[in-house]
């Protein structure tokens, strides 16, 4: 659950940074600061997703060491 909360919080901060940058109302210096925050949040999101991917792969690993491939879908 901590990964989900961390990911969601970072994604929200990234979205906020994008909105601020897209507004065109920031000075160059402010834009650079907001861009830096966005890059840092994007890296946190990337790391979180990579961590989840590794955990899913471990869950799907078969006894013989092979990975069982399953298609993940939001539809049930």
Image (tube, rainbow, N blue to C red):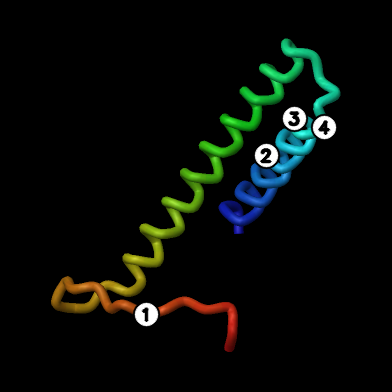
Residue identified by numbered label 2: 14
| Residue 70: numbered disc | 1
Tell me if residue 50 comes above or below residue 10 in the rendering: below
User: In the image, 31: left or right of 50?
Assistant: right
Give the class, few, some or many, for how many residues have Cα within 10 Å of label 3's Cα (few <14, many ≥20): some
* First in residue order: circle 2 vs circle 1: 2
Q: What whole-number distance in Å separates the C-alpha atoms at marks 1 and 4? A: 41 Å
Specify the farthest residue to the top. 29
**Mark 3 vs 2, N-terminal side:** 2
Q: Dots 1 and 4: beta carbons under 8 Å? A: no
Front label number (3 vs 1):
3
Disc 2: CA contacts within 10 A as few (<14), some (14-19) or many (>=20): many
Residue 29 position by quadrant: top right
Estimate how packed mark 1 is, as few (under 14), some (14 to 19) or many (20 or more) residues with alpha carbons within 10 Å: few
Does dot 1 land on a helix, a strand or a loop?
loop
Mark number for residue 21? 3
Mark 1 or mark 4: which is in front? 4
Residue in front for this viewpoint, 15 or 53? 15
Left or right of 69? Residue 5 is right
Which quarter of the figure has residue 12? top right
Which corner quadrant holds the C terminus? bottom right
Q: Earlier in the sequence, mark 1 or mark 4?
A: 4
Whether label 2 touches label 1, CB < 8 Å = no
Earlier in the chain: of badge 3 and badge 1, it is 3
Q: Position of residue 34 (x, y in %)?
A: 71, 24
Q: Quadrant of residue 39?
A: top right
Q: Residue furthest bottom?
A: 76
Where does the image place residue 17, in percent across and percent down from the top left? 73, 34
Label of residue 23 in the image: 4
Residue at left offset 71%, top offset 37%: 18
**SS of the residue under disc 3:** helix
The extreme right residue here reads 25
């Amino acid at each position: 659950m901590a990964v989900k909360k961390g990911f969601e919080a970072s994604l929200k901060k990234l979205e906020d940074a994008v909105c601020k940058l897209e507004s065109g109302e920031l000075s160059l210096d402010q834009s650079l600061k907001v861009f830096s925050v966005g890059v840092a949040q994007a890296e946190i999101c990337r790391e979180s997703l990579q961590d989840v991917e590794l955990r899913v792969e471990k869950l799907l690993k078969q006894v013989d060491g092979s990975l069982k491939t399953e298609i993940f879908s939001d539809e049930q």
